[in-house]
Amino acid sequence: MKYETIRLIFGALATVGLYSVLYRENKMYRFFEHVFLGLASGYTLVAVWTETLKQSWWDPMVGTQTENGVPGQPGFWAYMFLLPIGLMGYFVFSKKNNWLSRIPIGIILGLWSGQQLQVWWNRYGPQLDDSLRPIIPTSFNPMFVPSTKGLPKIEVDAIKAHVYVSTAVSNIIFVITLLSVLSYFLFSFELKAKFMQKTTLLGRWLLMIGFGAIFGSTVMMRFTLLIDRMYFIWVETVWQGILGQK
């Protein structure tokens, strides 16, 4: 039996075994679960070296060379001090010297905390800027955004500079949704005005609609994975793999 056939059959059995948990937990599912965890652990060890340590630590320390043997990026010996700092983390398994493991943890937390300021702004800064949308149209003819396909950049920029009726309506819906949802999270004081109560109620409904859309996308993603696995079993394994070789 060819290696390709063995690979396809084992892949199909692993797929069926993992999906058998939908019926109930069984020994077949447990077996393939442990196989998957073992393969994932081995892959993670290799990935830590090839994708993290080698690129971020080893190559900068020893330097790199091009394919022709010409020296590329020079090495920096100061990177060697990262090795003992990283090894200190393993002292967490020592009852006597476990205090040494706090040193790399403190360094990581300090660097991570400083980076989070820039990460926060890179993530939420564009969202804050995008929330300031114009709601008054500047062009009524046409009402919808014209097509920019095939137009030069000057004309495209001129079209984007206007706020059309369709864009203004979309922006109004966005602003109402944003303010309503934000008003729902005003827990610091009691909202006695009926207008604010209605606004928070609208924000709650809009949140439910948004969460429903996210849940629907999650379910569709699971179905996408299921369809891919069923295609692997029935088409790649049974039809093209086993029956095709016969």
Image (tube, rainbow, N blue to C red):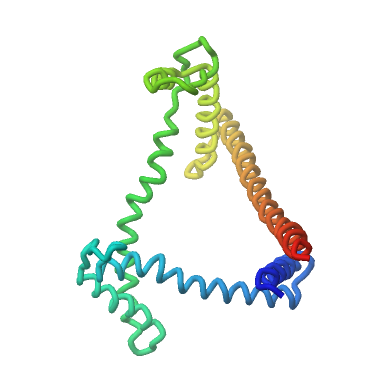
**The N terminus appears in which quarter of the rendering?**
bottom right
Q: Nearer the viewer, residue 107 or 82?
A: 82
Q: Position of residue 90 (x, y in %)?
A: 38, 81
Q: Nearer the viewer, residue 134 or 225?
A: 225
At 54% from the left edge and 37% from the top edge, which residue is drawn?
Answer: 181
Give the total of numbered labels: 0
Q: Going by the image, does 16 lie left or right of 207?
A: right
Q: Nearer the viewer, residue 190 or 7?
A: 7
At 69% from the left edge and 67% from the top edge, which residue is drawn?
Answer: 8
Determine which quarter of the picture holds residue 10. Answer: bottom right
Q: Position of residue 132 (x, y in %)?
A: 42, 30
Determine which quarter of the picture holds residue 193. Answer: top right
Q: Nearer the viewer, residue 151 or 110?
A: 151
* Residue 224 versus residue 203 in the image, above or below: below
**The C terminus appears in which quarter of the rendering?**
bottom right
Q: Going by the image, does 25 lie left or right of 41?
A: right
The residue furthest top is 141
At 33% from the left edge and 59% from the top edge, which residue is drawn?
Answer: 113
Q: Position of residue 9 (x, y in %)?
A: 72, 70
* Residue 228 versus residue 134 in the image, above or below: below
At 46% from the left edge and 74% from the top edge, which residue is drawn?
Answer: 45
Q: Going by the image, does 176 lie left or right of 106?
A: right
The residue furthest bottom is 96
* Residue 65 versus residue 103 in the image, above or below: above
Q: Position of residue 191 (x, y in %)?
A: 53, 36
